[in-house]
Image (spheres, rainbow, N blue to C red):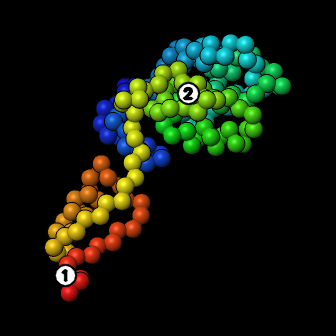
Amino acid sequence: MLFVPGKYRSHSGLLLPGKIECDALTETEIRWFADRIVELRPDTAYSEVIGVPRGGLRIADAVRAIAKIDRRGPVLIVDDVFTTGSSVETMAKKAGVAMGAVLFAWGECPPWVEPVFQMSPKLRPKRMSHIVEVEFADREHAHRLFDFLSRSQEWSFDGTVSMRSEEDES
């Protein structure tokens, strides 16, 4: 199944409303995507085609088989799913002058990365970081809320939690 329903946490920590499982794509479908990637920049010859491990490796092989290759061209970095771009960005820093292409993009891509399919801005996951300050009459209520939030898939804590109640003030 290509689109798997449910809540998933991305490698970068975003909560996603499903998973795009590109391992489900057949070789024929991978070749179809490779054709689309080459069509994005039909006049460009690449010095090298690099796939971001693991999802981009099959795609890179398929693109390499049909793309123009010229050692003077830019490196093409390919991946299956673009969420925040950290994997593609890391590869680009290693490669130097690079262009990118991805099959699916959850969010907005930088100008040098072309998505074949991109999620509507209204449906994109949002990275949210908030500091919430709540006062409680006693520690028991504060602990119950903290326990609830820490079990929820909707929340994650990457900082410290400080609990203070009126009991502490007296």
* Count of numbered marks: 2
Vertical position of residue 43 compared to residue 75: above or below:
above
Quadrant into which the N terminus falls: top left
Name the residue located 40 percent from the left edge and 52 percent from the top edge.
129
Disc 1/disc 2 C-alpha distance (Å): 54 Å
Q: Amino acid at mark 2?
A: Val
Q: In the rendering, at what x and y percent does residue 83 appear?
A: 48, 37
Q: In the rendering, at what x and y percent does residue 79 appear?
A: 57, 31
**Residue that sits furthest to the right in the current view:** 72
Q: Secondary structure at mark 2?
A: strand
Q: Is residue 70 left or right of residue 145?
A: right
Q: Amino acid at mark 1?
A: Glu
Quadrant into which the C terminus falls: bottom left
Q: Is residue 140 left or right of residue 89?
A: left
Q: Looking at the rendered structure, which numbered label has been put on residue 167?
A: 1
Along the line of sight, the residue nearer the viewer: 99 or 111: 111
How many C-alpha atoms fall within 10 Å of the one at disc 2: few (<14), some, or many (≥20)?
many
Q: Earlier in the sequence, mark 1 or mark 2?
A: 2
Q: Is residue 32 visible?
A: yes
- Where residue 115 sits, quadrant-wise, is top right
Vertical position of residue 154 compared to residue 95: above or below:
below
Vertical position of residue 87 compared to residue 149: above or below:
above
Name the residue located 19 percent from the left edge and 65 percent from the top edge.
144
Which residue is the site of mark 2? Answer: 102
Q: Secondary structure at mark 1?
A: helix
- Where residue 78 sits, quadrant-wise, is top right
- Where residue 138 sits, quadrant-wise, is bottom left
